[in-house]
Amino acid sequence: MSVGEGEFVAITGRSGSGKSTLLGILGTLDRDFQGNLNIAGTDTSTLEGEALAGLRREQMGFIFQDFHLLPNLTALENVLLPAVFSGRDMGPVEHEAADLLDRLGVRMDATPSRFLSRGERQRVAAARALAGKPRVLLADEPTASLDEASEDILFDLLDAMRREKGFALVAVVHTKSVLERADQVLDLREGVLHSESIHA
């Protein structure tokens, strides 16, 4: 598969077909595969340790199914956490993080453990991934916990930011209205990606 700058590639497939594994490979989290993975002109097989972590930190954003939020931190603190570890200037990051949470309708001072619904936690996870300004955003069923209106809000924001920032989006999705937004739809069947047209 090939993903261009600013492109939205949707991945579909039956449960257990390997969609999450594919995202793990693309995100350099799973390195047990055959073939080559090139990200922004870099052959990832040549990287180890801190060099690989640096590429992941600087180039990739992740929205996981299980969110991976720290329960006692506020929504804003969860979004800012990757920037804290990367040593970035917190002023601009904090402003962007607050703006993202506002656009997604999440209270900045709420914590996942007490005040955030599952759908709100999903939106915090999305804001955290976007605040890192990735070149490639990988999303594993990012709207699985959202109602239709919230799903539209999230993908409206992702579409606007892709146009503005130029990052590529690779997402496992199932909803037809979301698939219609994609530049490519690839269906994973028995380990092989097949190009699909939802308009056929």
Image: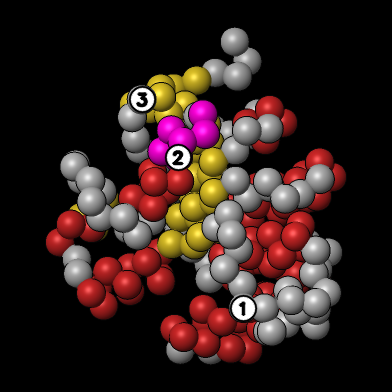
Under circle 3, the secondary element is loop
Residue at image position (54%, 44%) is: 171
**Residue at the disc numbered 2:** 19
Rendered image: mark on residue 190: 3
Residue at image position (35%, 60%) is: 29
Q: Position of residue 191 (x, y in %)?
A: 33, 29
Q: Amino acid at mark 1?
A: Leu
**Residue at the disc numbered 1:** 70
Residue at image position (43%, 33%) is: 17
Under circle 1, the secondary element is loop
Under circle 2, the secondary element is helix
- Which image quarter holds the C terminus? top right
Q: Amino acid at mark 3?
A: Glu
Between disc 3 and disc 1, whose residue precedes?
1
Distance from label 3 to label 2 (Cα)? Answer: 11 Å
Q: Where 178 sits versus 151, above or below?
A: above
Q: Position of residue 169 (x, y in %)?
A: 52, 48
- Identify which residue, 9 or 141, lies in the foreground: 141
Bounds of the magenta segment:
14-19
